[in-house]
Image (cartoon, rainbow, N blue to C red):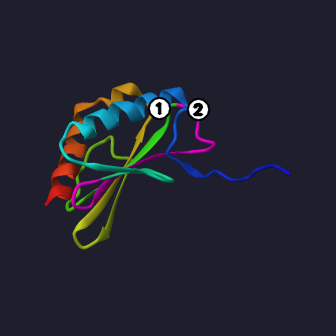
Amino acid sequence: MTDRTNKMISDFTAKPQTQSHYESIDAFVQGLGAVSKTAKAQVSYAVNRKFLWLWAYEKTADGTLYLNMTLDHPEHHTGVHNLTQVSPNRWNHHVEVKSARTAQSEWLRALIATGFEFAAQ
């Protein structure tokens, strides 16, 4: 019988390019200030509330890292793959990180810093 699962994962060590993207983003987030990190099915970051989630799927090709950021307003950028309003003052920003260039980009770092500031309120 074939394994048909494709679970979310937070351990990227078997995917070296994905791990590299994750390490770049993690180092940036940790440098923003006091933040708590939890790794279960996803790696999540919080200050006073959670604001950032990172994950891949078991069957995702190496080099793809998914990111979700929650803000109190929409941020429109061509790098945001999907933008969804989930409640009156909450928007989820979904980003697919498929390169070191994206993982280290100024626009993504600005988005993450905005999420950090929002979570610290």
- Judged left or right of residue 2, residue 90 is left
Q: Which mark is residue 14?
A: 2
Determine which quarter of the picture holds residue 109: top left
Q: Give the magenta range.
A: 46-62
On screen, residue 33 above or below 19: below
Q: Amino acid at mark 2?
A: Ala
Q: Nearer the viewer, residue 82 or 58?
A: 58
Whether residue 117 is situated above or below residue 11 in the rendered picture? below
Mark 1 is on which residue type? Gln
- Image coordinates of residue 20 in percent, x first then y, are 43, 28
> Element type at marker 2?
loop
Residue at (60% x, 52% y) in the render: 7
Q: Residue at x 61, y 44 (%)?
A: 58
Within 10 Å of disc 1 (Cα), the crowding (few <14, some 14-19, many 20+) is: many
Q: Earlier in the sequence, mark 2 or mark 1?
A: 2
Residue plotted at (63% across, 42% down):
59
Q: Is residue 56 magenta?
A: yes
Q: Which mark is residue 89?
A: none
Q: Secondary structure at mark 1?
A: helix
The image shows a total of numbered marks equal to 2
Q: Nearer the viewer, residue 104 or 41?
A: 41
Question: Percent x, y for residue 81?
Answer: 39, 47
Q: Residue at x 18, y 48 (%)?
A: 114
Between the residue at mark 2 and the residue at mark 1, the CA separation in whole angstroms equals: 8 Å
Mark 2 and mark 1 residues within 8 Å of each other at the beta carbon: no
Give how far across and how far down residue 45 sits, in percent.
32, 51
- Whether residue 102 is situated above or below residue 52 in the rendered picture: above
Q: Which mark is residue 19?
A: 1
Q: Is residue 69 visible?
A: no
64 and 47: which is toward the camera: 47
